[in-house]
Amino acid sequence: CIRDRPKSEMPEIVSGCDVALVPLKKLDLFLGAIPSKVFENLSMQKPVLLGVDGEARELFINQGKAGWYYEPENLQELILKIKEIKKSPEEILKRGENGRGYVKQFFERDVIAEKFYSILNGKLKASNSIPLAVGKKLELLIWAQHALAFIALSLYVPINVILLVRCYGFDLKF
């Protein structure tokens, strides 16, 4: 059993695994959860055995083809999935590659920041209600772009999130 290891040791530990088990309790609260361990393991090309329903299942199992799903807290289904996975070493490699590619394409911080910046910047340019000659207002809007990008990255907020930014009476809605 591995307990309380420093984060610096995790790459070595993960590299010794074939598949990462990512379980959560079966609670409605977790339907919108994406455990950070999903990103860590997929970035190292390790597929996940995901015991998390909802958004995480949709993104990484259904869309990303980056692992397997089992019903949270269903021990029998977990055992069956482990036996199924053990029989297919080539599928482990394939889903690991899928996961790394999926995370790189959709969840890399630079990619998210660029998409977020493009959307926000496009909204600012499309608006005629901002006199760009006003230095303070422009400075505040540029600061807002960076702040929102940081928040989105910190929380892994999907790009289609609805935000409302209010800057001196100017509304950005997308």
Image: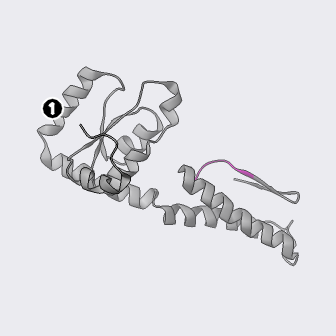
Q: Position of residue 102 (x, y in %)?
A: 37, 55
Q: What amino acid type is highlighted by mark number 1?
A: Lys
Task: State whether residue 118 appears in this view.
Answer: yes
Given residues 64 and 1, the one toward you in this image is 1
Q: Position of residue 17 (x, y in %)?
A: 21, 47
Q: Position of residue 167 (x, y in %)?
A: 83, 59
Callout count: 1
Kindly report the secondary structure that dominates the magenta region of the rendered protein.
loop
Q: Is residue 162 found inside the magenta-colored segment of the image?
A: yes
Question: Going by the image, does 33 lie left or right of 71?
Answer: right
Q: Position of residue 144 (x, y in %)?
A: 73, 62
Residue tagged 1: 83
**Position of 4 relative to 100 (above/below):** above
Given residues 129 and 68, the one toward you in this image is 68
Question: Going by the image, does 34 lie left or right of 19?
Answer: right
Instruction: Report the span colored magenta.
Output: 158-164
Q: Residues within 10 Å of mark 1 (few under 14, many from 20)?
A: few
Outermost residue, left side: 87
Q: Residue at x 40, y 31 (%)?
A: 24
The quarter of the image holding the N terminus is top left
- Where on the picture, by quarter, is residue 98? bottom left
Given residues 10 and 118, the one toward you in this image is 10
| Secondary structure at numbered mark 1 | helix
Q: Residue at x 13, y 46 (%)?
A: 89
Q: Is residue 12 found inside the magenta-colored segment of the image?
A: no
**Position of 126 relative to 82 (above/below):** below
Q: Residue at x 66, y 58 (%)?
A: 148
Task: State whether residue 158 appears in this view.
Answer: no
